[in-house]
Image (cartoon, rainbow, N blue to C red):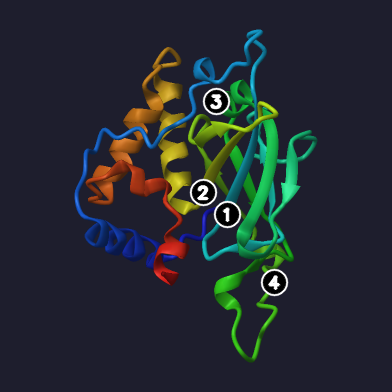
């Protein structure tokens, strides 16, 4: 079960008004594994730096869901979020283009929205409150390769990206040959949320609100 905060939609719509309108077909510089190969056609390695949030989530488990079970159990590419919901994963471009990114909000995870002057460590999530967020495969934004051939990448995992991934999975279940499922899913969720720029679905709304 997803415990979405109503404020997330408000923040997203506020960000839409603040940044103005732009082309709803923008690609957000999404990763294309065909464009990220080494000179010998070896798949390039991506160092993916990301953040996971409802509010920023500290102590959550993040992984590539290579076996499509919506769990990080047994996943080789996994880590734990730090302050600010920050995490880093390393895999090939092909792997990031193929597998969703899962954030398991487990017992003990702290939503940093609960941090106050009187509660500086925040309130840990209980076993009864656990939930899972996700971001679609191929939803990483990429930068140029470093001298060592590693390509820097970034991703934001949130209830909004989870809506996109859920819609993408629904479309693929209805038509396994649908190669445009991610684009269609982003457009559908943007329409539902009345967001004109689909790139805002993957923006860090927490950082935007703090600016």
The answer for how far apart the CA atoms under marks 1 and 2 are is: 6 Å
Q: Is residue 172 above or below residue 101?
A: above
Of pointers 4 and 1, the one earlier in the residue sequence: 1
Q: Which mark is residue 124?
A: 4
Of pointers 2 and 3, the one earlier in the residue sequence: 3
Could you tell me if the residues under marks 1 and 3 are in contact, i.e. CB atoms within 8 Å? no
**Is residue 146 rendered to the left or right of residue 160?**
right
Of pointers 1 and 3, the one earlier in the residue sequence: 1
Which residue is disc 3 drawn over? 97
> For residue 52, what is the image quadrant?
bottom right
As helix, strand or loop, the secondary structure at mark 2 comes to strand
For image coordinates 42% across by 50% down, the residue present is 160
As rendered, which of 27 and 58 lies closer to the eye?
Answer: 27
For image coordinates 42% across by 60% down, the residue present is 205
Which residue is disc 2 drawn over? 156
For image coordinates 64% across by 22% down, the residue present is 44
Q: Is residue 13 above or below residue 122?
A: above
Camera-side mark, 4 or 1? 1
The answer for how far apart the CA atoms under marks 2 and 4 are is: 21 Å
Residue lying at the far top of the rendered structure: 40
Residue lying at the far left of the rendered structure: 21
The answer for how far apart the CA atoms under marks 1 and 3 are is: 19 Å
Could you tell me if the residues under marks 3 and 4 are in contact, i.e. CB atoms within 8 Å? no
Could you tell me if the residues under marks 1 and 2 are in contact, i.e. CB atoms within 8 Å? yes
Of pointers 3 and 4, the one earlier in the residue sequence: 3
């Amino acid at each position: 079960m997803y415990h979405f905060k109503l404020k997330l939609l408000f923040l997203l719509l506020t960000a839409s008004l603040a940044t103005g309108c732009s082309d709803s077909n923008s690609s957000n510089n999404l990763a294309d594994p065909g464009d990220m190969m080494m000179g010998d056609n070896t798949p390039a390695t991506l160092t993916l730096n990301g953040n996971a949030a409802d509010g920023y989530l500290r102590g959550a488990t993040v992984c590539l869901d290579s076996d499509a079970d919506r769990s990080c159990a047994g996943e080789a590419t996994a880590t734990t979020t730090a302050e600010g919901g920050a995490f880093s994963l390393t895999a090939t471009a092909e792997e990031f283009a193929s597998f969703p990114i899962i954030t398991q909000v487990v017992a003990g995870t702290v939503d940093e929205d609960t941090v106050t002057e009187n509660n500086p460590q925040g309130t840990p999530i209980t076993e009864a409150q656990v939930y899972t967020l996700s971001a679609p495969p191929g939803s990483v934004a990429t930068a140029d390769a470093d001298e060592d051939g590693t390509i820097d990448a970034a991703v934001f995992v949130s209830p909004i990206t989870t809506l996109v991934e859920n819609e993408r999975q629904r479309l693929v279940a209805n038509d396994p040959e649908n190669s445009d499922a991610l684009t269609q899913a982003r457009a559908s969720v943007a329409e539902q949320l009345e967001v004109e720029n689909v790139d805002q679905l993957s923006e860090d709304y927490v950082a935007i609100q703090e600016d």
